[in-house]
Amino acid sequence: MTQIDLSRSFKAPDWLAVSQRATEIGDSHHLERQYIEIADEVKAAVEAVLPSGKYTLGPRVAEFERAFAEYCDSKFCIGMASGTAALHLALEALGVGPGDEVITVSNTYVATAFAISYTGATPVFADVDPQTYNMTADLVAPKITSRTRALIPVHLYGHPVDMDPLMELAKARGLWVLEDASHSHGATYKGRKTGSLGHIAAFSFYPGKNLGAYGDGGAITTSDPELNEKVRMLRYIGQRVKWVHEVIGFQERLDDAEIHRPAREVGSRSDRLSGTAR
Ligand SMILES: Cc1ncc(COP(=O)(O)O)c(C=O)c1O
């Protein structure tokens, strides 16, 4: 395994330099502070959804999908229940299954590897570059076998993977590339947005992410019409037309609105309901 020297100075490649600006993340209560700043906007948005009776895959999800696809330089966006579901159903849509291998990295959230396991395939871990901590084509190449079907590069902490050599390798070896873009909403690689660099991409909207929902949420982006159609079918119980279940699908829809309370309020309310202290 690569030994990472934490005292070394970081020399970023040119294409990564754009990500070097410092960002103030804040303390552990940043979600509450953020909510307080935008509370009126959030309340108005939630109040617009609640009387509509359309809470899952409603018009606001469709509106968001159009806007997020455009933002990610992609033709399609499919709203999902979580980033984990997005990774899983992207792999299902790619036809990954038992007997296959999918190469990813181990310095990611465990869901990246679990999504591979959910399909019955085997996760294979490639080492990472000691400068960027990201997957590289050179480190992936020796891990490819006759069973390899796909690669999952993770744009760790918003730093895009060096995608051009990876896509070249994938093309030469006939592999799918699924970007795990859960950390990289809005990040660019050579002027192109992450989420548009592979064949398909998965985003998480977990509250602490760059684009956080009020609850769990996620999305898939792709510019491949066939993958778009497959993912939409898989996301909503195998249907293209309501009540016609063409495949064994999943229930992984994105909601139109979720009510979020600052953590302290949620804690005190559930303490009262359950009668236990936390
Ligand atoms: C790199 C990465 N992949 C996948 C996920 C899974 O996303 P979610 O929590 O929305 O299921 C996360 C979330 O923490 C993540 O950081």
Image: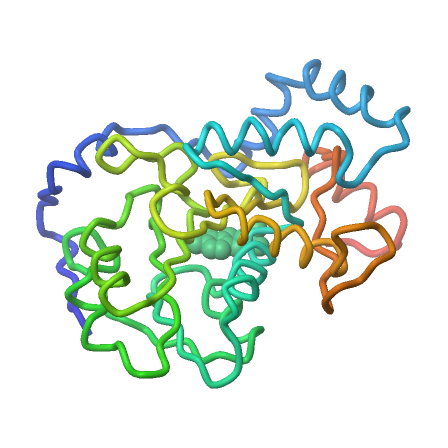
Percent from the top left, x then y, of residue 268? 78, 41
Percent from the top left, x then y, of residue 73? 41, 32
Image quadrant in which you'd find residue 137: bottom left
Residue occupying the point 26% across, 69% down: 173
Q: Is residue 249 above or below residue 78?
A: below
Residue occupying the point 50% across, 40% down: 209
- Of residues 240 and 10, the one nearer the viewer is 240
Q: Is residue 211 above or below residue 131?
A: above
Q: Does 194 sit left or right of 167 as displayed? A: right
Asked which colour scheme the image uses, the reply is rainbow
Quarter of the image where the C terminus is located: bottom right
Percent from the top left, x then y, of residue 61? 69, 34
Residue occupying the point 19% across, 74% down: 1
Residue occupying the point 34% across, 70% down: 103
Q: Does 187 sit left or right of 132 as displayed? A: right
- Of residues 191 and 40, the one nearer the viewer is 191
- Of residues 84 and 143, the one nearer the viewer is 143
Percent from the top left, x then y, of residue 248? 73, 69
